[in-house]
Amino acid sequence: MDDDAGLEMRRQELRLIKMFLRITDSSKRQRIVDLAEHLAGNAAFNGPESGPAKTPTIEDYKDSSGRLE
């Protein structure tokens, strides 16, 4: 990875971490983690003992009123 690409990736990582830490609702934080795992396409985050990963659906990202969050 060249220096410019590495620097940009680090900036994005820091932005993501800062925004994530500002979220106080634990259920929303967990939904973000689940989405990130799904987007990464890596079921290893769930660990081998937890069985196959559940793929989130659009319904998983709706609040109690049916709106997307």
Image (tube, rainbow, N blue to C red):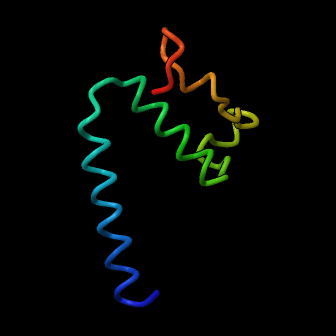
Placement of 36 over or under 3, stated as above or below: above
Q: Nearer the viewer, residue 38 or 42?
A: 38
In the picture, the quarter occupied by the C terminus is top left
Q: Residue at x 63, y 28 (%)?
A: 58
Q: Residue at x 46, y 37 (%)?
A: 32
Q: Is residue 56 left or right of residue 19?
A: right
Where is residue 67 drawn, in percent x and y?
Answer: 50, 19
Q: Residue furthest bottom?
A: 2
Q: Is residue 23 left or right of residue 66?
A: left
Placement of 67 over or under 11, stated as above or below: above
Where is residue 61 drawn, in percent x and y?
Answer: 54, 26
Where is residue 12 drawn, in percent x and y?
Answer: 34, 63
Where is residue 66 drawn, in percent x and y?
Answer: 54, 14
| Quadrant of the rendered image containing residue 13 | bottom left
Q: Residue furthest top?
A: 65
Q: Nearer the viewer, residue 32 or 43?
A: 32
Q: Nearer the viewer, residue 39 or 26?
A: 39
Q: Residue at x 40, y 82 (%)?
A: 5
Count how many numbered circles sit on residues in the image.
0
Q: Residue at x 67, y 30 (%)?
A: 57
| Quadrant of the rendered image containing residue 47 | top right
Q: Residue furthest front?
A: 67
Placement of 66 over or under 22, stated as above or below: above
